[in-house]
Amino acid sequence: MDVVTYPNPSLLKKTAPVDVVDDATRAKITEMYDLMHKSRGVGLAAPQVGWSVRLLVLNPGDDRANDEVLINPVIKKKRGRVLGEEGCLSFPGIYVQVERAKEIDVEFTDATGARRTETRSDFVARIIQHEVDHLDNILLLHRMTPADRVRVKRELETLAERG
């Protein structure tokens, strides 16, 4: 399993809901955790590994005990706005300012198959919103201002040439 980078078409392929959380799904989740940590990321969405399902993993720190999976996540409510820097494993070396909700209510299925709704804020809310964007085929490129696109034009062209 590898992180796919822009402009790989799997980043824009429609994602399907995860119907069942079985051993095969859990094995892929474990691979995603490993890849996220190896890549020094804080979140990873299934489309970033070429898997077109509505699933993401996250961990805002280094302690693997805090690894978390959100299956079929839906952001139910957003509160507040905050501007912050974001990068993306699918856009290596590119960082831009993105406005996000400061706090969200997110409904999801956990690794046991239980449906939950939780409130998340600050950095974790930002991670979830970024990864849900991937599930909705919204890329960091789509969140860039025109000035950002000019500033990172060379990096985007290099990624496109490698793609």
Image: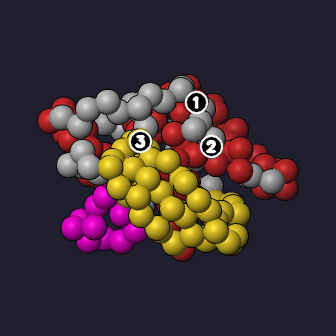
Residue depth check, mark 2 versus mark 3: number of the one nearer the observer: 3
Q: Quadrant of the C terminus?
A: top right
Q: Residue at x 58, y 46 (%)?
A: 133
Q: Which residues are magenta?
A: 59-70
Q: Which mark is residue 139?
A: 2
Of the numbered discs in the image, which one, if any, rests on residue 155? none
Give the Cα separation between the discs numbered 1 and 3. Answer: 17 Å
| Residue at mark 3 | 72
* Secondary structure type for disc 2: loop
- Tell me which residue sits at (31%, 58%) in the image: 68
**Residue 42 percent location from the top left of the image:** 42, 61
Task: Give left or right: position of 141 versus 114.
Answer: right
Q: Nearer the viewer, mark 1 or mark 3?
A: 3
Residue 25 lies, in percent from the top left, at 24, 36
The residue lying at 39 percent from left, 50 percent from top is: 108
Q: CA distance from mark 2 to mark 3?
A: 18 Å
Frontmost residue, 59 versus 103: 103
92 falls in the magenta region:
no
Q: Work out whether residue 44 can be spotted.
A: no
Mark 1 or mark 3: which comes first in sequence?
1
Instruction: Look at mark 1 in the image and give the residue it sits on.
Output: 12
